[in-house]
Structure formats: structure tokens, C-alpha cells
Amino acid sequence: GQQVMQIPQYQHVQEGEDFTTYCNSSTTLSNIQWYKQRPGGHPVFLIQLVKSGEVKKQKRLTFQFGEAKKNSSLHITATQTTDVGTYFCAGGDYKLSFGAGTTVTVRA
Amino acid sequence: GAGVSQTPSNKVTEKGKYVELRCDPISGHTALYWYRQSLGQGPEFLIYFQGTGAADDSGLPNDRFFAVRPEGSVSTLKIQRTERGDSAVYLCASSPGTPGRAFFGQGTRLTVV
């Protein structure tokens, strides 16, 4: 079945620095979604990418869908303490397959 | 309501007991999903409803798990003869269509002792 893997599992970032988290699928995806889960919270939708090579930006967050539609990345610039949480990518038409997430902590 | 509502928020039960977890989706959302999330993992798909019918129940781990959505709105996840390994956060999500963004509820934390 479809497997989605994320790296790194943990990301410790100095406030103000940039970082990238990566998502790779064993199969071609029709679309990829990204969610953020704060500690003790539930996953909250961030973005959906559909087209090959698509790039979308949300303020300091840049999302990219690979040309082969098998990988994706999330790049955060000038990290803030509000960016703390676990970021999940998920692929699938209706049955989302989630990666294990990248848990981000920020050093002030 | 404004969002997906799940009750109870926490449930502690003894091994072997039966539990029901309830999900009230966003009004008008035809698609409803149940996921299970263990500590340090991403949500794991259990079952998907489109309207009243279970369109895909391939994620249910075994026949102790069952879910219904009789009127196409509220859904109940039922677990019989609970085991300690069933302990997890059970998340419900709804969506206005597929594929599309999923709106998650706060989850029910199930602890089997």
C-alpha cells in the first residue's frame, strides 16, 4: 500500500533560522496535503497541492510538490515560537496516508 | 456547529469492555472519516463514510471495530472487547467533498486499563 515518509523526525531550530522538512511517497500521489498539530491539539489543515511542480506560499511557509508527484517539502523562513508543533504531510484521494510527522521545537 | 465535535474527550475503560465514541461533523459535510493516532505517529486511517454508507472500511484493524452513520451526519465508532493495544487518540474528520481538506475534531483519548 501507499507509504508516506517524512524526514527529519525532529527539527530543533533557533528562532529566526530557516528549515525544511521533506515528505516522500512510495507511489505517485494525486495530491498532497500538509497539516500542523500543536502539542495536545488536533491536525489543522495548512495547504493542498495538486499539480506537478506546484509551489504555494503562506507568509513564511513555502510548500512544493515534486515534478513526479512523489515528494513534497515545507520550508519555513525566520522561524518563530508560534511555529512549534508537528507538521504532517498526507497523500491520497479520500483515504489520507499520513507520514509520521516532523516535530519542531524552537530555541528562543 | 462551527467545527467537528467529538465526545467524550477522554474515556478510560477496563480491558474487555465495550465503548462507543461519537462524532458530530460539520453540517453539510458528506464525507466523514475516522482515524487513530498513537503517540509519536501520524493519524492512521480506519474508515470513510460517504453519506450513510461506509465507502471504505479497510483500515479497521479487526472485527471488534465497527462504525455507523445511520442518517448521514453523526457517526459512532464502536469497539467491542477492548484491549490495551486499542489505547490511542481516535480522531474524526469531515470534508465537504473528496479529495479535499479534512476538518479534524479534537479527538477522543481512549485508555484501556
Image (cartoon, rainbow, N blue to C red):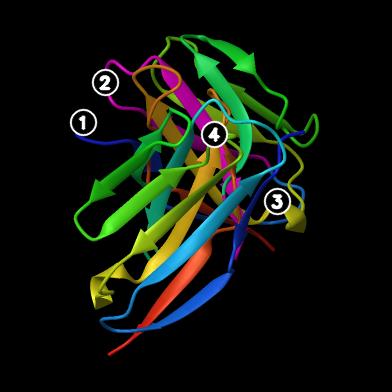
Pointers 3 and 1 within a single chain: yes
Q: Rounded to the nearest whole Å, what is the CA distance between mark 1 and mark 4?
A: 19 Å
- Residue to which mark 4 is pinned: B34
Residue at image x 26%, y 36%? B3
Q: Rounded to the nearest whole Å, what is the CA distance between mark 1 and mark 2?
A: 7 Å
- Residue to which mark 1 is pinned: B1
- Residue B19 picture location, percent across and down: 61, 41
| Residue B34 included in the magenta stretch of the image | yes
Query: Which dot, 1 or 4, sits closer to the camera?
Result: 4
Of the residues under marks 1 and 2, which one precedes in the sequence?
A: 1
Amino acid marked by disc 4: Trp
Q: Residue furthest bottom?
A: A108
| Residue A10 included in the magenta stretch of the image | no
- Residue to which mark 3 is pinned: B86
- Residue to which mark 2 is pinned: B27
Amino acid marked by disc 3: Asp
User: Quick one: SS at disc 3?
Assistant: helix
Amino acid marked by disc 2: Ser
Q: Rounded to the nearest whole Å, what is the CA distance between mark 3 and mark 4?
A: 14 Å
Pointers 4 and 2 within a single chain: yes
